[in-house]
Image (cartoon, grey):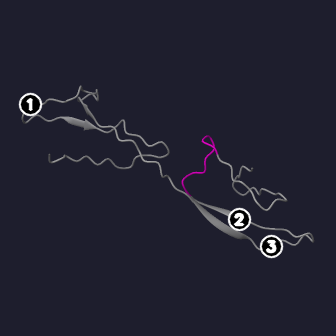
Amino acid sequence: MATFKPNVPVVQKDPVVSVDVSASNPLSTGKHTFILTVVDDSGNESDKVSIDVIVQDTDRPTAVLDAVDKNGNILALPLVVAPGASFILSGVRSKDATGKIKEYRFTMDPA
């Protein structure tokens, strides 16, 4: 088990290391490069080799759709409006557990 910090080598005799992360200390999404250098019993250092690990958010966001008044208060459903009356839809309560929502797509079902 090892907790990696940028530019701080984890030195050990075992050739296998577990990269331990937790919810409170995760690797951020994106590319992370890990480097290995080995030293022989004469003190000779190898060239560095590296591997890229991509942390990808695979959790789906949760969409929450509400009808709200002009002050943002949630209205009771089903929403009943008069012909020609405007109304407001809100996706503000939508969330993503590990990231940020970057786009809201509102579509009217033709049914």
Reading the chain from its start, which is encountered first: label 3 or label 2?
2
State the residue at coordinates (61%, 47%).
Answer: 26
Q: Label 3 sits on what residue type?
A: Ser
Residue furthest toward the right? 42
Q: Predominant secondary structure in magenta?
A: loop
Q: Give whichever of 33, 70 is nearer the camera.
A: 33
Horizontal arrangement in the rendering, residue 51 relative to residue 90 (left or right): right
Reading the chain from its start, which is encountered first: label 1 or label 2?
2
Q: Label 2 sits on what residue type?
A: Ile
Q: Considering the numbered disc 3 on the image, is that residue within a helix, a strand or a loop?
A: loop
Q: Label 1 sits on what residue type?
A: Ala
- Badge 2: residue crowd in 10 Å (few <14, some 14–19, many ≥20): few
Work out whether 71 lies above or below 111: above
Q: Which residue is mark 3?
A: 46
C-beta proximity under 8 Å, tags 1 and 3: no
Q: Which residue is mark 2?
A: 35
State the residue at coordinates (14%, 29%).
Answer: 80
C-beta proximity under 8 Å, tags 1 and 2: no
State the residue at coordinates (38%, 49%).
Answer: 102
Image location (x, y in percent) of residue 46: 80, 73
- Badge 1: residue crowd in 10 Å (few <14, some 14–19, many ≥20): few
Work out whether 60 lies above or below 93: below
Quadrant in the rendering for residue 33 = bottom right
Work out whether 61 lies above or below 40: above
Reading the chain from its start, which is encountered first: label 1 or label 3?
3
The residues colored magenta run 22-30
Image location (x, y in percent) of residue 83: 6, 34
* Residue 41 is inside the magenta segment: no
